Amino acid sequence: MSNSVKAIILAAGKGKRMKSSLPKVLHKILGKSLIERVIDTVLKSGCIAQTIVITGHQAEEVNKRLSDAYTDIPTILQEPQSGTGDAVFQAYENLRGFEGTVLVLCGDTPLLSEKTLFEFVKTHQESGACLSVMSAIFDNPHNYGRIVRGNDDQITKIVEEKDASPQEKNIKEINAGVYCLQWDKIAPAFFEITADNAQKEYYLTDIVDWSVKKGYKTSVFTIENNYEIFGINSRKHLAEATKMLSTITIEKLMEQGVTFICPQSTVVSPETLIGQDSIVYPGCVFEGVNVFGKNNVLGPNTFISGNVKTDDNVKIIQSKASDSSIGENSTVGPFARLRNNADIANNVRIGNFVEIKNSRVNTSTNVSHLSYIGDAYLGANVNIGAGTITANYDPLTKIKSKTCLEDGVKIGSNCVLIAPVKVEKNANIGAGSVITRDVPQSALALTRERQRIIENWVEKKLNKI
Ligand code: UD1
Ligand code: CA
């Protein structure tokens, strides 16, 4: 692409139709906020030199999220928020002397693809237009601005729903809210647009009418996948966008050889990769960025909330996982929970009602029933009996300590390992023990009382009564 391109993303609006204390653009779709979806699309399009975000309503929260997630996305405050035209105008100083293309997008249209964006910018620059507007044909254009075309089919203006005549309301071609501006030509428009409309706001859409009247070439880029410019203004829209994005992702994964037993009951983020011949049972939700290997069995009812990686032949049944990895041929669940850096090796079994947090579990180790393993290192071929827990947290000092179980260690059922503690290679712990001191290699540690038998105790008791 010849000219340099800067992007401005509008994210200052209140989003009052969301009825939320959270800024609209921070609402999430499948684990990623609306604004991050738009920014990532811009970054991935590969044709943008700089991206600026206009913030306003609850700017502090939006700015914080952006500085946590990105290193080089400057924000400009729009205060008060008097319309989309006024929002772009806030970048005027920043863009002084810039002679390239300014791409304007809304922070509430998260389904736009990088391919569409790239094509749009390319078409704009090749056409030599001063202003290009992205449009789409909607069966139900309600609430969007309409593209008004003259007798020669050329765009003459954009009219907002609230300002449209009954005839204009019948127009099905809508304004996507994405524009390319030849900045040095179009910038003067921002001094001339007025707030003389139904919403008493400075409409960005008014620059179209301005550009046409100036005699500047003004073009429309109509996209085919019109779901891409779906704007989020309400909770209903949020649900619809989630459904659309998930459905497209599932269809793509099915084409790549993944079985979904009931796609309608499954929700998958576009950042989730699933290997060939995996089977996803009903009721699964996969949010955030995840990579599943080949031949996995996932679900039913498995909730993955991001940063989960599995190798081939892994099963995760009726379980919840985040920020964890699982090696080849390992099984998790039913009813297990992996979180905060659970690092599971190959051929491991994490069974019913087991929680693993910030722990490494090595090859061929079993934690099969009713356990909590936190801040621990479990060697290879370790067996953890049912009901065993690592007591990693001291509520008085608030210090968390580590448990280390070396290769071949066997822990009987219902043991408590009070961390910090180390059990050396091949040592055994008797069932029901509370272990507070390190156990040497190949030893047996027992802390429970010896069993006593009182003969005929029941009869004696009854006689007394
Ligand atoms: C806008 C367009 C409409 C288009 C639709 C596409 C205008 C006047 N209308 O309408 O033609 O069909 O998008 O989705 O532009 N914002 C600010 N500052 C403000 C007001 C809004 O930054 O003062 C931001 C919002 O945060 C939002 C975006 O601009 O991200 C669009 O604002 P919104 O109020 O949602 O506009 P729409 O009514 O959807
Ligand atoms: Ca909108």
Image: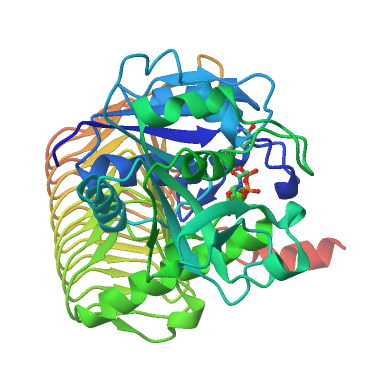
User: Against 411, is 283 above or below?
Assistant: below
Residue sitting at the far right: 465
Q: Residue at x 53, y 47 (%)?
A: 108
Q: Is residue 373 visible?
A: no
Q: Nearer the viewer, residue 387 or 230?
A: 230
Q: In which quarter of the view is residue 418 placed?
A: top left
Could you tell me which quadrant the N terminus lies in? Answer: top left
Q: Position of residue 338 (x, y in %)?
A: 37, 51
For the point 34% across and 57% down, the residue is: 385
Query: What residue appears at the point 54 percent right and 26 percent down from the top-left corner?
Result: 190
Where ligand 1 lies, by quadrant? top right
Of 73 and 406, the residue lying toward us: 73
Q: Position of residue 33 (x, y in %)?
A: 48, 44
Considering depth in this image, is 359 or 200 the residue closer to the camera? 200
Q: Who's the residue at 56% across and 28% down the image?
A: 87
Give how far across and how far down residue 392 sits, in percent.
41, 31
| Residue 458 shows in the view | yes
Expressed as whole percent of the image width and height from the top left, the position of residue 463 reads 81, 67
**Residue in the foreground of this view, choosing between 85 and 155:** 155
